[in-house]
Image (cartoon, rainbow, N blue to C red):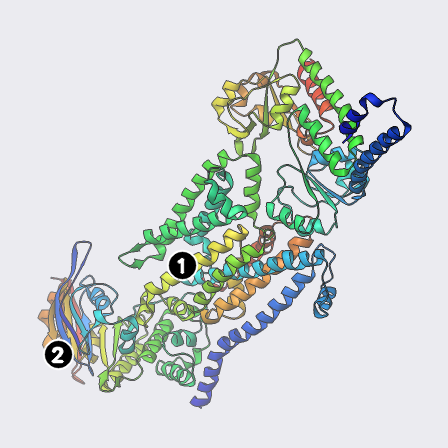
Amino acid sequence: MLQANDVSVEINNKTILENVKFEVPAGKITALIGPNGSGKSTLMRAISSEISYQGKILINEQDINSMKAWELAAIRAVLPQNSSVAFPFTVAEVIHIGLRNGTNSSTGHLINEALECVGLLSLAERQYSQLSGGEQQRVQLARVLAQVWSPVINGSAKWIFLDEPVSSLDISFQLEVMNLMQNYANKGGGVFTIMHDLNLTAMYADYVGVLHNGKLLCFGTPSEVINDKILSEAYSCRIKVNITPQNDKIFILPQATKI
Amino acid sequence: MISTEGSKNKSMLNDRYRAGRRAHIILTFALLLVSGFSLAIGPADVSIWLILKKLMLNELLTSLEYIIIFDIRLPRLLLGTCVGAALAISGAVMQGLFRNPLADPGLIGISAGAGLGAIIAIVLGGIIPGFIASILGNYLVVFFAFLGGWATTLILYSVATRRGQTSVATMLLAGIALGALAGAISGILVYRANDQQLRDLTFWGLGSLAGASWAKVTVAGPLIGIAILFAARLGHGLNALALGEATAAHIGVATQNLKNKAIFTVAAATGIAVAVSGGIGFIGIVVPHLVRQLIGPDHRTLILNSGLLGAIILVLADVISRIIVAPAELPIGIITAVIGAPVFLWILLSNRREGNW
Amino acid sequence: MKNFISKRLHGKIKGTPFEISIFILCIFLLSSSYVYADSKRQELDKVVSIGGSITEIIYELEEAHRLVARDSTSTYPRAASMLPDVGYMRALSPEGILSMDPNLIIAEEGSGPQETIDLLTQVSIPFIKISDGYTRQGIIQKILEVGDALGVNTKAEKVAAKINAELMDAESKSNQYSGKRKKVLFILSTRGGKILASGTNTAADGIIKMAGAINAIHSFNGYKPLSDEAVTVAAPDVILMMDRRGDHGSGGEELFSMPSISTTPAAETKSLIRMNGLYLLGFGPRTASAINELREELYSD
């Protein structure tokens, strides 16, 4: 369970987040959507313990403020929007750094499996900095997966937090990554992700939260949240939610004009 | 199919790490070899084999033999090993901390502060209260250089640290400002200096192991040894830092703790190294980079290997400085610059070609 | 001891042959102990000389055959520069000196560092420091001290006497000069646009005075950078500098075009004197000749 109780963040006397409150169960994919500047990244940073905030954030009923860095690393992994790696580390080394254990045989095995998941096993010995942006993003995902490889341990769920994980990927990889996330959630892990793409959100999310001007506009299942009214208000432009006739999938299109 | 490919990859992952560990052994042997070389070679006509024979047969050495080997060459070798290791390790740690292969220990203000301390001791030596001066004797400059290095590091650290978080970017910029300030104060003091003091300053700036003595070794050795022990354990943390500060925290590294340890180990090691041997340049930048090119960037082995290689290079440079214009001596800073500058340029050019940055 | 015996013998000078013999014996023993000490020192045949003027004095005393090495400032006479060079006198390295296997080191005041000196004395090599002094007496003292160190006191006294006479002659000629005394500004270097000039209490100051001129600067000690104003206020008639190697008599165009210098009387008459550094400032055997030469350059036109 991921809980946010009255989370507020103020930076330079400007209120970025105001009284955000929600509860997210493990075993589901929860997406956070909203326009740029609505505070999505700030909320993610607060949940990832990067910035200070008012209120309470609990993972598996533990206050994250009271936990040390390594304790948090044991129960949650964070995929940043982009990340560069200084120095010529190889792909395998990058993933290995993300693991807290020392070098042993099971670690190597884990790294390979993680790379396999994202389809990059053949690039294991390549230098990370020489990969394309999309490939780098997938390596980071492999690292994140390796960090919290077992979605559930002793009845306690592990969590993956993602900040726009598919923005720089080709469409086929976008689906692959989302499938990976779904897989993880199905096994009992928790997934909390900022999403830019409304269609993918509609396809994969079990819960959706909409941020607007630092406030949580609404939070619920896609059927509750993804409708014309809420989306148009959040994004300040006319949005129409449609259903494909063939397979009952939701697809969302903006209409050309702004409200 | 997958498992064989997997195990191949797994062993390749360990390859660089294992190569790094093997390098520890190879470099240690090389250091021992170079040390023997350094004890055996020098302008004085003293045969190391004869001395070894005498020692084994429990015969007395002549006072000349004793002085040359035990009072001149041996402390010089030990000091060179300590200083070379301290500078190279500090460079490796700094590069990890600033996530940049061009970082060197001077970035946290140590060299500027140490230089200022040395100038104060050389130029204002007469003003320092008699009893302090008599206790320190010849080591007045060493003491003040060390104090100076620490003072600037502490100032920089407190400027760059807000609410328990150190910003390395701020440290970099503040370091530039502090360096300028130290330069200005130095300029004022240099004005007050007489001709002899100016020459002493120049020689100090060029760096030398000629003043090596057992006193210096017993002060510098343990301090540098402790700093190296601390630094060697920063390996995993610095690896994590390479992924970005935020990510390092996410994967469980206590980043502020890491920064504190890094900054103050470097301050201790470099501070005392610069204090006892003056300004020896290029070791801090060039040595870690060589190791990175040859073995890889994994800090868990990089730090110790840099230390070993730094020691080897400085001891060799010292041998050159002692024989190239014998019986005079070339300040060692000149030799490290002559070797280091072209290597540094090569680093820059090869990095640009590879498109690393 | 001698006094004791002569007092005793005062009234008995016509005394017995026995007493006279004793008298002669005592004198013989005393002078032999003096000579004995001398000869011990004379045996020291592997001498390292530190300091340009010290080396010159050793050559003047005709003891240069005992030299095995010298420092980097010992450039005169030419033979000296052929000897092995142990480095700069303030940055000596012990092993380099020891490799010359010396049994005596004679060093000018200011040699160092102290750690090197300590190490050398530890190996029981006599390290004798010669006092410095920018006057005639200073030079004489130097010669006597060097002579003593080498165990050639009698020769040293002769040489000192000769040099003393030369110096007194030079100085009296300077004193007798009846014309207007010129103001001389000694500039050590103009590197970086800064004018490093000599105040009082330096070798330059000493030599200027001995040549019968006035140091244009008297407001500070030692070598200091001068501000443009200070140069103008000093208003030197002549500028004195050391000559750069191979750069003899390069006209002072660059110097006189400096804004501060261009306002001085020296610039108007383009009066620049350059002399070899060791010759001019060494305060050694050649100083009398340097004084004369400087005085000629100053006052004969």
Are discs 2 and 1 less than 8 Å apart at CB? no
Q: Position of residue A9 (x, y in %)?
A: 17, 61
Chain of the residue where label 2 is placed in the rendered structure: A
- Position of residue C15 relative to residue B154, above or below, is above
Residue annotated with mark 1: B264
Residue annotated with mark 2: A221
- Position of residue C163 relative to residue B155, above or below, is above
Q: Position of residue B239 (x, y in %)?
A: 41, 69
Location of the C terminus of chain B (image quadrant):
bottom left
Q: Residue furthest top?
A: C178
Q: Position of residue C297 (x, y in %)?
A: 69, 18
Chain of the residue where label 1 is placed in the rendered structure: B
Residue B349 visible (yes or no):
no
Left or right: B74 as drawn, with respect to A85: right
Left or right: C228 as drawn, with respect to C167: left
Which residue is found at the position 57% from the left and 16% from the top?
A: C265
The part of the image, by quadrant, that contains residue C252 is top right
**Which amino acid is tagged 1?**
Phe
Q: Position of residue B2 (x, y in %)?
A: 43, 89
Question: Do discs 2 and 1 share a chain?
Answer: no
Q: Residues within 10 Å of mark 1 (few under 14, many from 20)?
A: many
